[in-house]
Image (tube, helix red, strand yellow):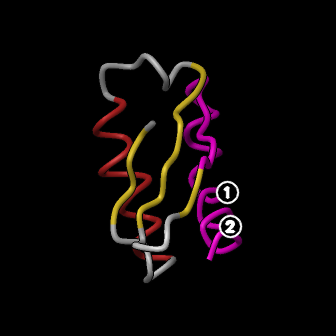
Amino acid sequence: MKEKVEAALNKVRPYLQRDGGDVELISVEDDGTVKVRLTGACGGCPMATQTLKNGIERVLKEEVKEVKEVVSV
């Protein structure tokens, strides 16, 4: 499942990089929780939570059915 998550993250990564940020995969848990770290401009952005839930989590859930939740660590 980790490879599928990485492939899905690669689809959203260009949008984050365009704004000076990025996303780093920390872990994929057995319960379907994906832990990521927003880096660069995204790390301290006031809209980071919205980006995480409405962008990254939405895409990951669409691409990888096993994903239940995405959390920032």
Residue at the image point whose x is 59% and y is 40% from the top? 23
Q: Residues within 10 Å of mark 1 (few under 14, many from 20)?
A: few
**Residue 53 sits above or below residue 17 on the image:** below
> Which corner quadrant of the image does residue 6 belong to?
bottom right
Residue positioned 49% across, 50% down in the render? 35
Relative image position of residue 51 (x, y in whole percent): 37, 40
What residue lies at 60% left-to-right and 57% top-to-bottom? 9
Q: Which residue is mark 2?
A: 7
Label 1: which secondary element: helix
Q: In the picture provided, is 60 more to the left or to the right than 3?
A: left
Which residue is at 44% across, 53% downward? 56
Q: CA distance from mark 2 to mark 1?
A: 5 Å
- Bounds of the magenta segment: 1-26
**Residues at badges 2 and 1 in contact (C-beta under 8 Å)?**
yes
Residue 11 highlighted magenta (yes or no): yes
Q: Which mark is residue 10?
A: 1
Image quadrant assignment for residue 58: bottom left
Most frequent secondary structure within the magenta stretch = helix
Secondary structure of the residue carrying tag 2 is helix
Q: Residues within 10 Å of mark 2 (few under 14, many from 20)?
A: some
Q: Is residue 44 left or right of residue 25?
A: left
Residue 24: x and y in percent read 63, 42
From the viewer's perspective, is residue 35 above or below residue 42? below
Tell me where residue 49 appears, x and y as whole percent: 30, 36
Report how many numbered discs are placed on residues in the image: 2
The spot of residue 2 in percent (x, y) is 65, 69
Amino acid at pointer 2: Ala
**Residue furthest out toward the front:** 30
